[in-house]
Amino acid sequence: MINYEKFELENGLRVIFHEDKTTPLAVVNILYDVGARDESEEKTGFAHLFEHLMFGGSKNIENFDAPLQLAGGECNAFTSNDITNYYNTVPAQNLETAFWLESDRMLELAFTPKSLEVQRNVVVEEFKQRYLNQPYGDVWLELRPLIYKEHPYKWPTIGKKIEHIQDAVMEDVKSFFYSFYGPQNAILVVAGNTSLEKVRRLAEKYFGDIPERKRPTRNIPVEPEQNEYREKLIKREVPSNAVYMAFRMGKRASRDYYLGDLTSDILGNGKSSRLYDKLVNQEKKFSTISAYITGAMEDGLLVISGRPNDDISFDAAKESIRNVIDELLSAEIGDKELTKVKNKFKTAKVFGEQSLVNRAMNLAFFEELDMLSEMDQEINKYDSISSVELLDFAKKTFRHENTSTLLIQKSNG
């Protein structure tokens, strides 16, 4: 069980404290309720751009990294379609340094032309290297708009097109910051070898005077139910052909998440999973294949991805995947197989919670989901799933008309 205390400042900043006296460290984690889904379709990639801009200097601190490193700390961040998260690890006695740094960039960024130019170039280069010039790098640039027609999940976190970042101007940047980076739109988690009293004092000292900012009303269009099979073939200079099959499922806070997690593990997590054992080990049709879920805060996905061997056509590859799915749909999953995947989750959860950073991030994320009180019930939720319930989920999810397939054909150059 992860113990925590929670309080809120007058400006709306939610603060969660988790004490751990067994470590000499402290973690300061700030989750902002903003991701790629909050962007305009004409100006995408801004949430990810801000992940970089927040390290480019704030109102009173020219360089974020230098003071943190002098205090013996380190930091990092990530952006998703749903959230942006920043985390700092410091020796517990230097906790105040992290408060000072994080509060100053929440108050106001430097907004210098140099910082914007530097970070914009970094993101543009990342777009090119990871998404445009990397084998299979543009999978999500192609797959997302095939699946989502209305919802902003139809573009990846990096953005819809590189020009949106290249054309970003200071006015756009300031508008995005003051819309989403205020205390009322953030969750601060402090974890480690310190006290609630100290956390309260530092939170008031450094964050208490930051003014609350009114954020735009989130008005995200609902994605209509998919009632048609979709498929797209693209040719790329890749080592081998690839198949991606995506199935829409429920959001992270729903029962679907747990059902989808176990189902994807049974199908494609590890070399003993059904897809891998059948199509790689036995039939030798694929060189590799796996299944996973996205865990999105709104409608998520269960994805099967694999690379068929050169002598296997796309039609044969799709049929072989479908055959394994049909086997799953034909009978309830046995107790032994179901227990195995549940135990995998339990093991992963135990190991994950050994990390102080993971505990801090999980506290912030479950608060964002409005599920903080249920965080310690995850194992029970998995344990309560029956083979009958999994079969019902599979029948609902793996419908032909709920399938979007992206085929990547190896170019002959």
Image (cartoon, rainbow, N blue to C red):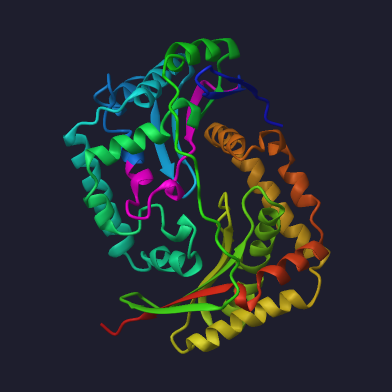
Q: Position of residue 20 (x, y in %)?
A: 61, 22
Q: Is residue 284 visible?
A: no
Which of the 4 image quadrants contains residue 265? bottom right
| Vertical order, 381 against 236 (above or below) | above
Q: Is residue 46 magenta?
A: yes
- Residue ID at (66%, 82%): 323
- Residue ID at (40%, 21%): 103
- Residue ID at (29%, 56%): 127
The number of numbered badges drawn on the structure is: 0
Q: Is residue 98 magenta?
A: no
Q: Compare residues 67 and 72 and report the one nearer the observer.
A: 67
Which of the 4 image quadrants contains residue 112? top left
Which of the 4 image quadrants contains residue 331? bottom right
- Residue ID at (32%, 51%): 43
Q: Which residues are magenta?
A: 22-49
| Vertical order, 118 against 387 (above or below) | above
Horizontal side, residue 201 vs residue 62: left or right: right
Q: Compare residues 58 and 209 and report the one nearer the observer.
A: 209
Horizontal side, residue 327 vs residue 402: left or right: right
Q: Position of residue 289 (x, y in %)?
A: 54, 71
Horizontal side, residue 305 vs residue 249: left or right: left
- Quadrant including the N terminus: top right
Q: Is residue 64 visible?
A: yes
Q: Position of residue 373 (x, y in %)?
A: 71, 33
- Quadrant including the C terminus: bottom left
Q: Compare residues 334 and 402 and report the one nearer the observer.
A: 402
Horizontal side, residue 191 vs residue 253: left or right: left
